[in-house]
Amino acid sequence: MASAGLKPGVPVTLRELEPSSEMFKQGASLRVTGILQSYDVNSATAVIQDGSVSLKVDSQLLMDISFRTNSAYQFIGELLIRPENDAILQAHIGRIVDGLDLNLYQQALLIRRQHEAKLWSSRRA
């Protein structure tokens, strides 16, 4: 049974996590995917990147995950926004997703959103 305190992570691309985005809010439960650029063992902080956009990920709560630079990772957690719009995802779940075609994944995400929007509009009618 799922914990009542954890919300499902809404899939977003790193490009959507800019301060003007509706997804960029304190405590938002998100699922992000990117290529690991660096990992600091002392602070348990990973940096993932998608194109020119990067995001810090706090991995202190993760168990049994090894970090390899240039591998693809997916994390689910809450977005914490610090001063000057510096964001970090506090991850509860993390997994390596090497082999995932990130471009195809992003296309599928757009199609999913279009389908969900169509369902919502048909329910309101």
Image (cartoon, helix red, strand yellow):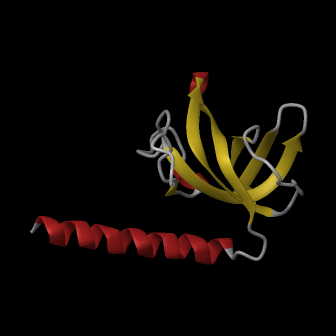
- Residue 110 on image: x %, y %: 46, 70
Image quadrant holding the C terminus, namely: bottom left
* Residue pictured at 17% horizontal, 72% vertical: 122
Location of residue 97 by image quarter = bottom right
* Residue pictured at 45% horizontal, 43% vertical: 4
Q: Is residue 83 left or right of residue 29?
A: right
Q: Is residue 29 left or right of residue 37?
A: left
Q: Is residue 119 left or right of residue 20?
A: left
Q: Tell me if residue 21 comes above or below residue 36 in the rendering.
A: above
* Residue pictured at 59% horizontal, 73% vertical: 105
Can residue 50 be seen by looking at this rendering?
no
Outermost residue on the front side: it is: 1
Can residue 8 be seen by looking at this rendering?
yes
Q: Is residue 116 left or right of residue 5?
A: left
- Residue 56 on image: x %, y %: 71, 41
Location of residue 31 by image quarter = bottom right
Most foreground residue, 74 or 22? 74
How many numbered marks are there? 0
Outermost residue on the top side: it is: 83
Q: Tell me if residue 24 comes above or below residue 93 in the rendering.
A: above
- Residue 115 on image: x %, y %: 34, 75
- Residue 26 on image: x %, y %: 49, 33
